[in-house]
Amino acid sequence: MLLHREGIQSVVLEARTREYVEDRVRAGLLEQNTVDLLHELDLAERLDREGLKHNGIYLRYHEKNHYVDMAGMTGRHVTIYGQQEVVKDLTQALLDRGVPVLFEVGDVALHDIETDHPRITYEHDGQTNELTCDAIAGCDGFHGVSRPTIGDHLTEYEYVYEFGWLGILAEAQPATDELIYAWHADGFALYTMRSQTISRLYLQVDADDDIGNWPDDRIWGELATRLGAVNEGPIFDKGITPMRSFVAEPMQHGRLFLAGDSAHIVPPTGAKGLNLAVNDARILAPGLAALIRDGDSKLIDGYSTAALRRVWRAQDFSNYMTQMLHDLGGGQFERQLQLARLEYIERSEAAARSLAENYVGLPPEPEF
Ligand code: DHB
């Protein structure tokens, strides 16, 4: 959409079906920067109607919720709106605005990326096709072909956690007005939502745990233990997601530019993943436009550095939230330190404000 606004032609190649990408349940917390950009692009009509605007969060420990008034401290908000809803809105808008989106594309390979005209070969509808491009945006996720294509030119940083999140969606009115991030002796839990009638909840579990070990009764029992009052209802989606921190640098080689999960993964605590991907796109598009339209590479040469500044900020914040709230396996001393950090946020406005400005998202870099 950003390239379309700049008058640059593009084609979107998607490996999966439209149904798959539009139904796949992901996180759902949009920073104000993300909401602002969707407004700027005239893509926020349904978001304005269905998104749930939030002012703060509860940090829960020792059976009590402690409110952090983020809007009060920063003047900024976050909005609950499922990632797949953003995908639906973007896909429809691309098609409406005449940008080709090809689904179920296979055998994608990238060629000549060190030249001014990189090529993409791919299979679609049983045919082999080739696209000659000015540039390629590698937005194909952690398991996509883009990053391995330039792997020899990248430095990779990675941390894999020993736990994951069991996530459910349930037909139940949320029992809380704001999200609850809970520290508990049994492990972390998060109470979030999708609407007035759909709750989304997460539990810390072992990374190699099997969803088969978690019948609905056990899930509700553990959620109630860690979160206090929970409204139960039919569970219609559940799964376990492993957690990792990952960065590949630089986010460019030749005319291939990495964006989103192809270049970086954050653990989900704080929900920065989608917001980082949107920020990459926000910086990348004007750089590509200047390169392609005017032959001016000044902006695009700064893409990786500018994007990585926010990526590493979010890495630190996501890791900080994760380490403060989960049972990391380091014993009682570690758990007491976590409680000391949580109490510091309650007692010190400086500590609460630092959490808040990271959670709602720092304002965009001014030069982009
Ligand atoms: C959601 C997910 C998160 O990881 C988070 O920190 C907040 C909300 C969500 O799915 O709603």
Image (cartoon, grey):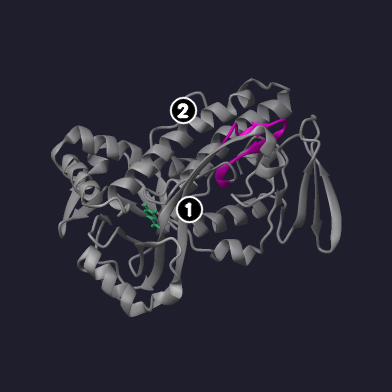
Locate residue 158 relative to residue 11 in the image: left or right. Answer: left
Determine the residue positioned at 62% across, 39% down. Answer: 258
> At label 1, which amino acid type do we have?
Glu
**Mark pair 2, 1: CA separation:** 26 Å
> Which residue type does callout 2 highlight?
Glu
Residue 333: image location, x then y, percent: 21, 47
Q: Which residues are magenta?
A: 248-261
Query: In which image quadrant can residue 226 be found?
Result: bottom left
The residue labelled by disc 1 is 45
Task: Point out which mark residue 365 bears.
Answer: 2
Does residue 322 sit above or below 20 in this rendering? Answer: above
Q: Position of residue 85 (x, y in %)?
A: 50, 59
| Figure quarter occupied by ligand 1 | bottom left
179 in the magenta segment: no
Q: Is residue 258 magenta?
A: yes
SS assignment at label 1: helix
